[in-house]
Amino acid sequence: MKKLLAIIGYLIFSAIVITPFYTGLSLLKVLPSFMISTFWFLMVLMAGINNRLSWALILLYFIPLAILFSYGYIEPQTLGSMILGIIWAILIYFSNEMHLDEY
């Protein structure tokens, strides 16, 4: 199961990198938002979802995002890459078995 999650994650990443070369998307609009959201939510997941710090980090991510999107500063393709970054962070988290507390 974890190999399947890793394969899906790498397919999402390669789709983010390859798609701008064949469409009118800009790689500079898609890739940084994808990587930032991936690292942000991977950090949140590693902190633990039951931790108050992770809920504060989630709110610190979504509140400015909603404000900027409502004023039109964030384009739909950037928002889509952010969503795919969140999905990729979840796939990395579960495919590497970071959810297991084995010390």
Image: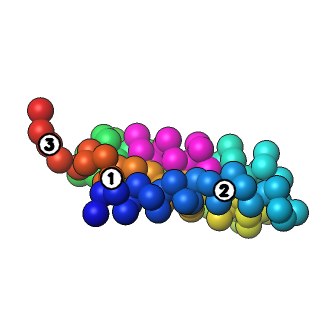
Label 3 belongs to which residue? 101
Picture coordinates of residue 51, whole percent (x, y): 26, 46
> Tag 3 or tag 2, which sits nearer the N-term?
2
Q: How many marks?
A: 3
In the picture shown, does residue 61 fall above or below 5? above
State the CA–CA distance, disc 3 to disc 1: 14 Å
State the CA–CA distance, disc 2 to disc 1: 19 Å
Q: For residue 21, what is the image quadrant?
A: bottom right
Q: Which numbered tag is attached to residue 95?
A: 1
Label 2 belongs to which residue? 16
Q: Amino acid at mark 3?
A: Asp
Tell me the element at label 1. Answer: helix
In the picture shown, does residue 11 fall above or below 35? below
Q: Nearer the viewer, residue 85 or 50?
A: 85
Q: Nearer the viewer, residue 57 or 10?
A: 10
State the CA–CA distance, disc 2 to disc 3: 31 Å
Instruction: Say which residue appears at 87% left-offset and 63% top-offset.
Output: 24
Q: Quadrant of the C terminus?
A: top left
Q: Amino acid at mark 1?
A: Ser
Instruction: Say which residue appears at 51% left-offset and 54% top-offset.
Output: 10
Of all residues, the one furthest to the top in this rendering is: 103
Foreground: disc 3 or disc 1 = 1
Instruction: Say which residue appears at 65% left-offset and 60% top-offset.
Output: 15
Of all residues, the one furthest to the left in this rendering is: 103
Picture coordinates of residue 16, whole percent (x, y): 66, 56
Which span of residues is magenta-colored?
34-43
Picture coordinates of residue 46, whole percent (x, y): 32, 42
Q: Nearer the viewer, residue 44 or 65?
A: 44
Tell me the element at label 3. Answer: loop
